[in-house]
Image (tube, rainbow, N blue to C red):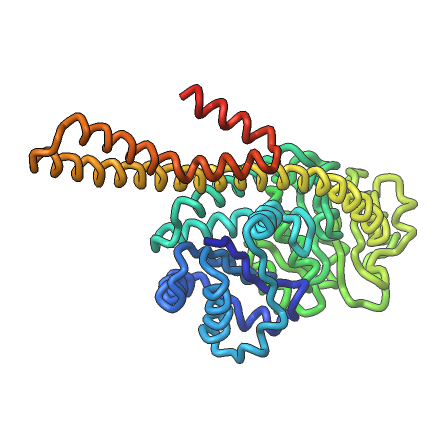
Amino acid sequence: MTIFALGINHKTAPVALREQVAFAPEQVAGALLDLAAATQVTDAVIVSTCNRTELYFSGTEAQSKQVIAWLAKFHQLELTDVAGHLYLHQDQAAATHLMRVAAGLDSLVLGEPQIFGQVKQAYSQSRQVGAIQPVFERLFQKTFAVAKQVRTDTDIGANAVSVAFAAVALAKQIFGKLDTVKVLLIGAGETIELVAKHLLEQGASQLTVANRSYDRAVALAAQFSGQVVSLAQVPQALVDADVVISSTASTLPIVGKGMVEQALKKRRHKPMFLVDLAVPRDIEAQVSELEDAYLYTVDDLQNIVSQNMQSRQHAATQAEQMIAAGVAEFSQWLQLQDNIDWVRDYRERCESVKTELVQRALNQLASGQDAERVLQELATKLSNRLMHAPTKTIRHLLQDEQVEAKTLINFLVDI
């Protein structure tokens, strides 16, 4: 049987198509059962995220084509609309792809950690419906071990690679802990929402949102029990703010030097960390001239992100080596299983030959034939039958002048 990795992702298809082939979490169990019934594949795991839908399964070449057709049919799509966006990997290439995915090397953001948990969840769902056999059990356990090693022994996820996360990482670097830090977020768009999520993940709990649309600010603040102020109230809000992060679509600065200077006086010059993620700027550049104000612009953060991406690329090279070693270990284990099956089959054949010839000898003895002649015939036929195939193989190996063959012969003679 062959191991397959069939998928569609952010590199091969637009988001509109990826949405159509995605599996909702509540669909996965039923889909696995339907897939097994329709194609008779023995193992199956479905990984479905916003950036990818992948099916890992074992079967034949013919079954792989059936799985492609099933995927289109399950989502009520024309096969021609899907097929050109799919990739299909086999055996070692499939194992390599799975490990790269779990380690975050195939993600839109290199090294992002969420995918590891998503792959583990997909594996658990398959186990629950009985879609994991011993080979896939071994494959996924090895994958998890390699992905964990990549996370532990490289810096693949150590540095921020988005300006939103870089802003939060800088704040944490300056303040140490963010649980007592008061944060003022100016704006309520996607960037500020992402900043808010990162802040919560890093322990921040005292967040205030200021936005031109008050209702939008209320909706965002409700997600983390934050406070809301209007843009007109920003000067007063600055007095309490240890961290200010701004990203709006305003064509004019919202926070000026004089506004920050007045706030710092009321704060008794307690330092203020400001990040301007907007283009054009939300915070006047002259704010950086103030002694207790530390202003970073989107360009400053882009430089940090660029450096961090280089660091992650170096870590990715290390990770690829770990994955190659993991795939090699899995392949060796798989080869050993094939050898065990071959040895088991060979022993069963030998046992069958022995049983057949012994029964024949017993029948001869029961009919009154000479016991010595029967035993001699039994020994001769048994040795001939058991030696025939191995002798042919040894002769073939010797013709190829392989050292391994002579070693094998010596081993057999010793036995």
Which of the 4 image quarters holds residue 315?
Answer: top right
In the foreground, 291 or 85:
85
Residue 274 position, x and y percent, is 79, 48
- Expressed as whole percent of the image width and height from the top left, the position of residue 211 reads 70, 64
In the image, 66: left or right of 40? right
Q: Is residue 62 left or right of residue 169?
A: left
Give the residue drawn at x 55%, y 47%.
116
- Which residue does the image show at 22% across and 41% down from the upper left? 356
Number of on-image labels: 0
Q: Nearest the camera: 200 or 385? A: 385
Seen in the picture, residue 215 relative to 159 is either above or below; the reply is: below
Placement of the C terminus among the 4 image quadrants? top left
Q: Residue at x 88, y 56 (%)?
A: 284
Q: Is residue 227 visible?
A: yes
Q: Nearer the viewer, residue 318 or 251?
A: 318
Q: Is residue 232 above or below residue 275?
A: below
* Image location of residue 357, percent across then percent down: 22, 38
Residue 115, can we see it?
no
Q: Position of residue 177 (x, y in %)?
A: 65, 36
**Is 87 situated above or below 371?**
below
Residue lying at the far top in this picture: please name it.
Answer: 414
Residue at left 45%, top 58%?
A: 59
